[in-house]
Amino acid sequence: MVVVRLTAKPVPGFQNQAGKAAMWEAVFASPSLKTYRTYTNSIAAAPPDIFKGVVAGLAMPWGGATRDAMAIDLSLFTVDSDAAFTAASADAADWLKKNPGKELSALELGDSYKFQGPVWYAMWGTKTSGYATFVDASTGKVLKHK
């Protein structure tokens, strides 16, 4: 099994803050079985779609790693979501001052050919009207923002 992605998700009635989330979604893949499963872990239930605790999704076909979705090398992943959020927030500070009220809309750990190892992706607002940054999951340094 390999980890492909880890994503913070919202739960109604709870607010994700400072790198902490009410629910996390993890995608695990099996190269030998050519399948992947999505698992969620939520602190509360919000029927009909969110259940408290760990829930495993169905096994789905997986064609293997792609340039944009590679397995995360867990030996290179040392920066947790709190530290990644802190680094991303510092990088986005000027933008956030100019755009008050913009909430964090994405916090995700993944790996792609664009970087040397796993990265945290944080975004405020939307892709067309927002601020996004990548934080190295090994060092905690901001690699790139857009």
Image (cartoon, rainbow, N blue to C red):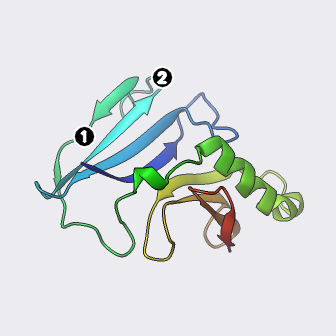
Position of residue 12 in the picture relative to residue 24 (left or right): right
Do the numbered discs 2 and 1 sit on residues whose CB atoms are within 8 Å? no
Observer-nearest of 107 and 71: 71
Q: Dot 1: what SS? A: loop
Q: Secondary structure at mark 2?
A: loop
The structure residue drawn at horizontal position 49% and vertical position 24%, both measured from the top left corner, is 43
Q: Residue drawn at (61%, 36%), measured in percent from left and top?
A: 20
Label 1: few (<14), some (14–19) or many (≥20) C-alpha neighbours in 10 Å: few
119 or 12: nearer the viewer = 119
In screen coordinates, is 124 left or right of 24? right
- The vertical placement of 45 against 32, above or below, is above
Instruction: Locate residue 146, reporting x and y percent.
Output: 68, 74
Relative horizontal placement of residue 138, taking residue 38 as reference (left or right): right
| Residue found farthest to the front | 75
What residue would you read off at disc 2?
44
Q: Position of residue 94 (x, y in %)?
A: 87, 64
Q: Which residue is mark 1?
A: 57
Q: Position of residue 112 (x, y in %)?
A: 43, 70
Q: Nearer the viewer, residue 2 or 45?
A: 2
- The answer to which of marks 2 and 1 sits earlier in the sequence is 2
Residue type at tag 1: Gly
Compared to residue 99, the image places residue 75 above or below, namely: above
Disc 2 and disc 1: Cα gap in Å?
A: 17 Å
